[in-house]
Image (cartoon, rainbow, N blue to C red):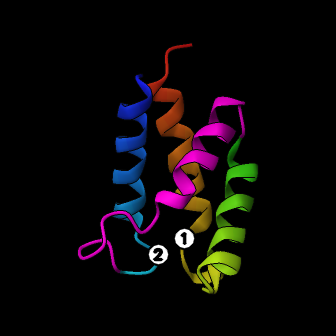
Amino acid sequence: MKPLDAQDSLRHLLNEWDPIGVADVVRDEYDCMIGPLLGRLARGAGRAEISEFLWFELEDHFGLDPASRGVDSMANRLVFWWASAVPS
């Protein structure tokens, strides 16, 4: 997958998840997570590491309570997406 395709696909997934509820108005709200997530996924991060990153970002960066935001489900989705999108 080309880097720009990966970024666009990941942006789409993050906007679908939309833990803040603003993606219909602000399409780049979660762009701050794209680079760090792609880096982790490219290094082979699993669900636990991705979940930990998402949890921290929601809590520390966005000021949200991650407990009710489906962090583990999103981490699973991202790991599956990466495994499906990137040839081994």
**Which of the pair 37/72 is nearer the observer?**
37
Q: Nearer the viewer, mark 2 or mark 1?
A: 2
- Can you give x and y, in whole percent of width and height, for residue 60 in the image? 71, 78
In the depicted structure, whether residue 48 falls above or below residue 2: below
The amino acid at mark 2 is Pro
Mark 2 and 1 residues: CB-CB less than 8 Å, in contact? Answer: yes
The amino acid at mark 1 is Gly
Q: In this view, does 28 lie to the left or right of 34?
A: left
Q: In this view, does 3 lie to the left or right of 16?
A: right
Quadrant assignment for the C terminus? top right
Mark 2, residue position: 19
Mark 1, residue position: 70
Q: In this view, does 3 lie to the left or right of 52?
A: left
Q: What are the residue bounds of the magenta stretch?
A: 22-45
Q: How crowded is mark 1: few (under 14 residues within 10 Å), some or many (20 or more)?
A: some
**Which of the pair 60/71 is nearer the observer?**
60
- Can you give x and y, in whole percent of width and height, for residue 87 in the image? 50, 15
Element marked by disc 2: loop
Q: Is residue 31 magenta?
A: yes
Element marked by disc 1: loop
Quadrant assignment for the N terminus? top left
Q: Residue at 35%, 32% (x, y): give it.
A: 5
Q: Residue at 72%, 39% (x, y): give it.
A: 45
Q: Is residue 46 magenta?
A: no
